[in-house]
């Protein structure tokens, strides 16, 4: 470069371009290290990462975890007899083998595991001589007709119908509580964390596949948190296929855009380097890939492509009158590094705001996305221009850029009309109408939490959801359990006042819509008192005699803790839809408000439904805070950058409109606001702000050159607008492939991101100039050198 241009160059530009071999060598060295780390990263999740640990419900559950057992994390295996009933020798032998097989799978809480073959599952009856009882499957069982008849009688007397045994006697359940960590079988002094994917695979291979093949009369259904997460991880591994599809689509479209294979490959390779660095840094930080953070590499790829396209477009334009590729690369770096840097900082700040949500998977997603956008500074803002300074742009691309610079573009001329006095008021009025309509629609229709039965993260016809439907339809106790913890003084859980209050709550819950049944200490006590009085239904109530009450709960194993200071009341729900949880929790809270007193408290909540209720409350309280922080941070970055409130409003208002319309679309499609969808809005804003910053930075430079607003916007569209339009369409097409995923929440995210990519792009091209017509005064900018960090 000439001495004049060298003097205009910033210190950073001279540092980078005067040491290009060193820059490439350092990037290569870092790539070798981080790519090695990236290939070491593994799918990883845990029960505690998926729940809001700071929520009062969860804190109470953790506080009393030892008293509750594994009510929050378990799987239920239903073994169905296709023909006949469970009272069959072959069926019972298969059930025993499955019980023993599952017993030895690592991670199972063996002491708490229950099935008909468990010694702790017992029957009780009243005889002329008093109470009699024993194991449901006695030691004398031998599979004979007589033994099966005895088994049938024991099951009828056990109280397990609808719980461990189906209402139609055609299936039974193995209840398998899990341990989040367990002793390594090879080294008892070392603790291993439960690997959900491996555990899910072991259930499939050692239980479902093995025993369905071994006994054709048996069909196996498996439900529970661990199984759902395992299926999610398996399905999300298909994200690699969608990533490959997005890569190929981007390759083709990028070549059509640039007409230069060298620049196309440069953008793709540097962006893939950014993805590799992000994964490597995540592994170095000790993070794995969970069902949510698996989507982060694609987001990094999208952001990298967005910035890479701007760089290539700028270099192609600069190459027309530059002496060589190095000069073009340096001019482009000088022109676009700062707006690119500000856009990336805005992205990072937007992602970091997700850290305020106290859910591990969202926090890891926020950290992963923030790391990813940070590395884009080095790969797409620095390494890419340096690489192009060596490789150059093809002659065909340069000639095309020169031709575009001197040819009238009817399409861009048409779009520039959004900045004229006739169209600008119409555009702003239309935007205002969309914002008001979208706001009230989502306010009245958008719900917090899941809106479907089973696992809404999976397709309705997935194997898991079919298994869940089977359990719901055949048992009185569903897989959705809300546990109310009744806390008393030591030895106080059997007091009449306590049991009477629990009885009242049980009655209230059983008459709450959405509740299947409720089971507590009272359930056993009432049955026992009836049994002690010759089975008379008149005595199926609570006695005021403390000795009778003490005796009545003696057989209520698992329904109170060792010192009788905590008794769980288990409420079995039809589903865990948002409305069901809200209604059920409200019923418990209103009862607790009226009946809590010194020595007696009704505490929420344990069980998977209790965890979902806590999660919904966190999401509901965080939604507005997250969006407000995202927009405040993005607005702050724009204000610092452009030193203009008007410029900030022009960039941020289209993003706010997109968020409102995105929420309205979620409500229209029946997608609830939950862990899987809340980050989408923040991520969409983070990516969408890039469009506005690049467009406004070029628009401002033309306004400073003295051009009127509409002409300045026309020139902006010719230089930067086509890159914005291409990026928005390219990324939307790539992410739209997710819609075909077997994982429903990935398909939902794909649909939402496709919508946000397009609407953010359209908002930047359509609404930004209309707002600029009302807010920007070109005569004040003309000839000005200050006021913006982009001014030279």
Image (cartoon, rainbow, N blue to C red):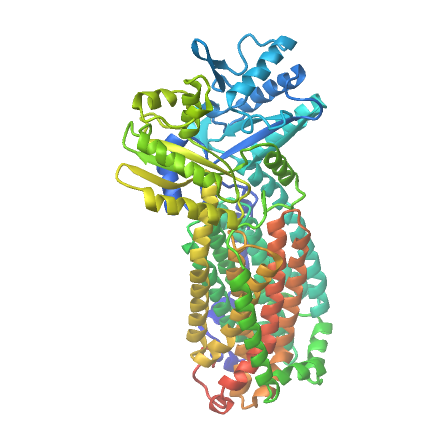
Residue drawn where x is 62% and y is 24% of the image? 169
Residue placed farthest to the left in the image? 598
Residue 615 in picture, x, y percent from top left: 46, 48
Image-based side of 92 in relation to 396, left or right: left
Quadrant that contains the N terminus: bottom right
Residue drawn where x is 54% and y is 73% of the image? 692
Residue 230 in picture, x, y percent from top left: 58, 38
- Quadrant in the picture for residue 527: top left
Residue drawn where x is 51% and y is 20% of the image? 158
Residue 548 in picture, x, y percent from top left: 34, 21
Q: Is residue 206 visible?
A: no
Residue 203 in picture, x, y percent from top left: 60, 30
Q: Nearer the viewer, residue 486 or 505?
A: 505
Q: Is residue 118 visible?
A: yes
Q: Is residue 338 above or below residue 544?
A: below
Image-based side of 552 in relation to 220, left or right: left
Q: Is residue 274 above or below residue 235?
A: below
Residue drawn where x is 44% and y is 41% of the image? 508
Counting labels gives 0
Residue placed farthest to the front in the image? 538
């Amino acid at each position: 470069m000439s001495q004049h241009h060298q003097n205009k160059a910033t210190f950073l530009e001279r540092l980078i371009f005067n040491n290009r071999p060193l820059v490439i060598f350092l990037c290569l060295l870092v790539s070798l290290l981080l790519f090695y780390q990236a290939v070491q990263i593994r799918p990883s999740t845990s029960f505690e990462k998926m729940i809001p640990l700071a929520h009062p419900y969860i804190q109470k559950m953790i506080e009393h975890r030892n008293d509750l057992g594994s009510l929050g994390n378990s799987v239920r295996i239903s073994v169905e007899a296709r023909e006949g009933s469970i009272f069959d020798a072959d069926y019972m032998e298969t059930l025993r083998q499955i019980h023993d097989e599952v017993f030895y799978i690592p991670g199972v809480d063996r002491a708490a595991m229950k099935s008909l073959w468990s010694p702790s599952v017992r029957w009780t009856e009243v005889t002329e001589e008093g109470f009699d009882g024993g194991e449901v499957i006695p030691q004398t069982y031998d599979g004979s007709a007589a033994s099966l008849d005895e088994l049938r009688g024991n099951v009828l007397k056990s109280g397990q119908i609808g719980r461990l045994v189906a209402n139609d006697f055609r299936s039974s359940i193995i209840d398998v509580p899990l341990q989040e960590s367990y002793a390594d079988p090879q080294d008892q002094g070392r603790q291993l964390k439960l690997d959900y994917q491996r555990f899910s695979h072991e259930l499939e291979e050692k239980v479902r596949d093995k025993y369905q093949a071994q006994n054709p009369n048996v069909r196996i259904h498996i439900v529970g948190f661990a199984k759902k997460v395992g299926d999610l991880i398996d399905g999300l591994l298909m994200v690699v296929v969608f990533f490959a599809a997005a890569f190929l689509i981007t390759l083709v479209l990028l070549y059509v855009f640039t007409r230069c294979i060298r620049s196309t490959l440069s953008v793709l390779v540097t962006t893939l380097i950014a993805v590799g660095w992000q994964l490597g840094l995540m592994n170095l930080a000790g993070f794995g890939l969970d069902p949510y953070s698996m989507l982060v590499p694609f987001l990094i790829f999208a952001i990298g492509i967005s910035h890479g396209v701007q760089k290539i477009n700028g270099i192609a334009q600069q190459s027309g009158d530059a002496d060589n590729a190095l000069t073009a690369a340096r001019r482009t770096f000088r022109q676009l590094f700062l707006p690119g840097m500000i856009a990336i900082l805005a992205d990072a700040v937007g992602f970091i705001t997700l850290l305020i949500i106290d859910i591990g998977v969202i926090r890891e997603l926020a950290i992963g996305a923030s790391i990813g956008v940070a590395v884009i500074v080095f790969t797409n803002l620095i390494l890419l221009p340096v690489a192009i300074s060596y490789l150059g742009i093809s002659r065909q691309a340069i000639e095309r850029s020169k031709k575009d610079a001197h040819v009238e573009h009817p399409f861009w001329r048409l779009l520039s009309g959004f900045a004229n006095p006739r169209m600008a008021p119409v555009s702003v009025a239309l935007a205002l109408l969309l914002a008001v309509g979208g706001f009230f629609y989502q306010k009245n229709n958008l719900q917090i939490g899941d809106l479907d039965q089973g696992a809404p993260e999976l397709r309705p016809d997935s194997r898991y959801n079919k298994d869940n439907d089977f359990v719901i339809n055949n048992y009185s106790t569903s897989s959705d359990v809300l546990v109310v913890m009744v806390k008393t003084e030591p030895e106080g859980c059997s007091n009449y006042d306590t049991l009477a209050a629990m009885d009242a709550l049980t009655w209230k819950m059983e008459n709450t819509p959405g509740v299947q049944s409720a089971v507590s200490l009272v359930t056993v006590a009432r049955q026992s008192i009836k049994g002690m009085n010759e089975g008379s239904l008149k005595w199926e109530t609570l006695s005021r005699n403390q000795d009778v009450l003490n005796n009545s709960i003696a057989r209520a194993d698992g329904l109170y803790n060792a010192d009788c200071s905590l008794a769980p009341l288990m409420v079995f729900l039809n589903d865990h839809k948002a409305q069901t949880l809200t209604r059920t929790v409200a019923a418990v809270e209103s009862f607790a408000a009226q009946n809590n007193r010194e020595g007696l408290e009704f505490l929420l909540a344990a069980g998977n439904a209790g965890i979902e209720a806590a999660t919904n409350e966190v999401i509901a309280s965080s939604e507005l805070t997250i969006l407000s922080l995202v927009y405040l941070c993005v607005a702050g970055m724009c204000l610092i950058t452009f030193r203009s409130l008007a410029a900030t409003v022009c960039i941020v208002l289209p993003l706010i409109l997109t968020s409102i319309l995105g929420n309205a679309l979620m409500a229209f499609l029946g997608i609830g606001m939950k862990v899987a969808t809340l980050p989408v809005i923040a991520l969409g804003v983070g990516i969408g702000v890039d469009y506005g910053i690049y467009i406004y930075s070029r628009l401002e430079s033309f306004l400073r050159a003295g051009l009127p607003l509409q002409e300045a916007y026309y020139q902006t569209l010719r230089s930067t607008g086509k890159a914005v339009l291409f990026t928005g369409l390219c990324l939307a097409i790539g992410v739209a492939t997710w819609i075909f995923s077997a994982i429903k929440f990935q398909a939902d995210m794909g649909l939402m991101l496709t919508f946000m990519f397009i609407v953010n792009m359209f908002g930047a091209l359509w609404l930004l100039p209309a707002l600029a017509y009302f807010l920007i005064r070109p005569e004040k900018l003309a000839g000005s050198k200050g006021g913006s960090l982009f001014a030279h």
